[in-house]
Amino acid sequence: MKKRIGLLYGGKSAEHEVSLSTALAVTKALDFDAYEVYPIYITHDGEWRKGERLEKMAETIEQLQLAGDLSKPNDISSFLPLQSDKALDVIIPLLHGPNGEDGTVQGLLEVMNLPYVGNGVLASSAGMDKVVMKQLFEQAGLNQTPYVYFIRRDWETNQDFWVEKVEAELAWPVFVKPANLGSSVGISKADNREELVAAVKEALKYDRKIVVEQGVVAREIEVGVLGNDEPECSVAGEIKPLKAFYDYQAKYKDGNTAMVIPAELDETVYAKLEEDAKKAFKILDCSGLVRADFFVTEANEILINEVNTLPGFTPYSMFPLLWENTGLPYPQLIERLVSLAIERHEEKQLLQVKID
């Protein structure tokens, strides 16, 4: 029996286009002899559209966007049927950013008791909010760069205080980020007070909470983590941007970056990276997959930057490349993720929901 797979992509997020690129890449990796594949597209406006079964890989992003024009918008029961003869065996969420990667859709799937690939509600929401993530990393004893955070109202009512706080606690340059967004959207580097103010203005377009991080001279190293209760790590990879930092344009548009896989690292450094990646995975209660991002200084000091609970699968993406170089090619990686999703779902069904 073929497994019935629902690909959930698009979304009401600034990372909508990234999600579409990921979905296109995933259709090209799926084994259509093993799976029945059903596209479920969420438009930029939040309208849900379920398409007819895909008989083969999608050729273009436009093909995926046109899927399901005739379906009834927002009739969730028609998108995620629960009847045994029509039920999807597993959902693959490919929604990056808010309204998808932040635990909202994961909560919907949990309530509907549907297996889905990737992290659950808690890990997704904590992993999306960079401030909450950093606070949990502190609890786990993970080394990281200093940071300052604030919300829109704080900034608008007392901008001078926050500028002075950044200058007092951090050193130039700093990186200004929306707390709840990924794919380097809305991130800017600031070398002085004027650039800080401009960077915060840019970041506030995307989120009400802003985090300002200390810049550090270091190598950017990433490690893939795969599993549920017993996570495994991939080889490490190094990002070498050909511009100031690894921004959205470099990631998804012009490929203006170099990836070195495996990264040239001392064995003891890699061992520590692996240890910290697993520690971050567990402190957030992750499952399925995570990409853990680190800084490694010239003195081999290791600083965790963040984890991405739904790393991209585009042609420029690090996560699948890390696993390919570890001996798990893209199609087999998808199969493993589907198996992990079903494994986790089956374990949850063992929980008692009635009191004796």
Image (spheres, rainbow, N blue to C red):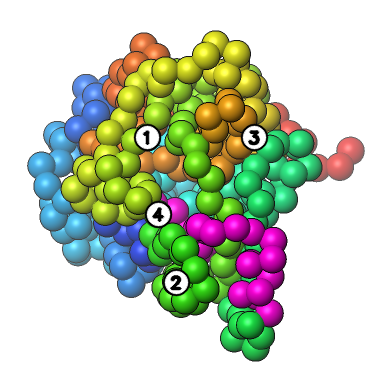
Q: Which residues are magenta?
A: 161-183
- Residue lying furthest bottom: 157
- Whole-percent x and y of residue 162? 65, 75
Q: Amino acid at mark 4?
A: Ser
Q: Which residue is mark 4?
A: 184
- Whole-percent x and y of residue 341? 50, 31
Given residues 161 and 27, the one toward you in this image is 161
Crowding near the residue tagged with mark 4, few <14, some 14–19, many ≥20 C-alpha atoms within 10 Å: some
Q: Which residue is mark 2?
A: 195
Q: Is residue 178 magenta?
A: yes
- Residue in the picture at 70% in, 42% down: 137
Q: Secondary structure at mark 4?
A: loop
Q: Secondary structure at mark 1?
A: strand
Q: Amino acid at mark 2?
A: Glu
Kindly indicate whether the residue at mark 1 contacts the one at mark 2 (C-beta within 8 angstroms).
Answer: no
- Whole-percent x and y of residue 264? 42, 18
Q: Is residue 186 magenta?
A: no
Q: Quadrant of residue 286?
A: top right
